Image (cartoon, grey):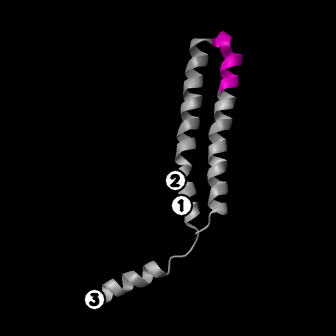
Amino acid sequence: MSAALETVNLAAGVTGNLGSIGYGLAAIGPGVGVGIIFGNGTQALARQPEAAGLIRTNQIMGFAFCEALALIGIVMGFLFRT
């Protein structure tokens, strides 16, 4: 009986912003996306070096969109505190 009571007391002592956990989980998506963008961009540059300008431009735009998702995730963690 006392072990169950200790577990309840430990759970009641947890404080903090759950948004930080949500942001940590949300950062996985943009991280994977950036890896895919640059991995495929490197392969494209190896296959067609003459299209380097266009490929690099598309890489930078894709990177910016992925990072925008990460920034939106961190802002939402601060706006909607629990």
**Disc sitting over residue 5 in the figure:** none
Quadrant in the picture for residue 43 = top right
Q: Quadrant of the C terminus?
A: bottom right
**Disc sitting over residue 21 in the figure:** 1
Q: Quadrant of the N terminus?
A: bottom left
Q: Residue type at mark 1?
A: Ile
Residue 42 is situated, as x and y percent measured from the top left of the image, at: 59, 23
Q: Secondary structure at mark 3?
A: loop
Which residue occupies the foreground of this view, 42 or 79?
79
Q: Residue type at mark 2?
A: Leu
Question: In this rendering, is residue 16 above or below 74?
Answer: below
| 53 inside magenta stretch | yes
Residue 36 located left or right of residue 56: left
Question: In this rendering, is residue 57 above or below 13?
Answer: above
**Disc sitting over residue 25 in the figure:** 2
**Disc sitting over residue 1 in the figure:** 3
Comes first in the chain, label 1 or label 3: 3
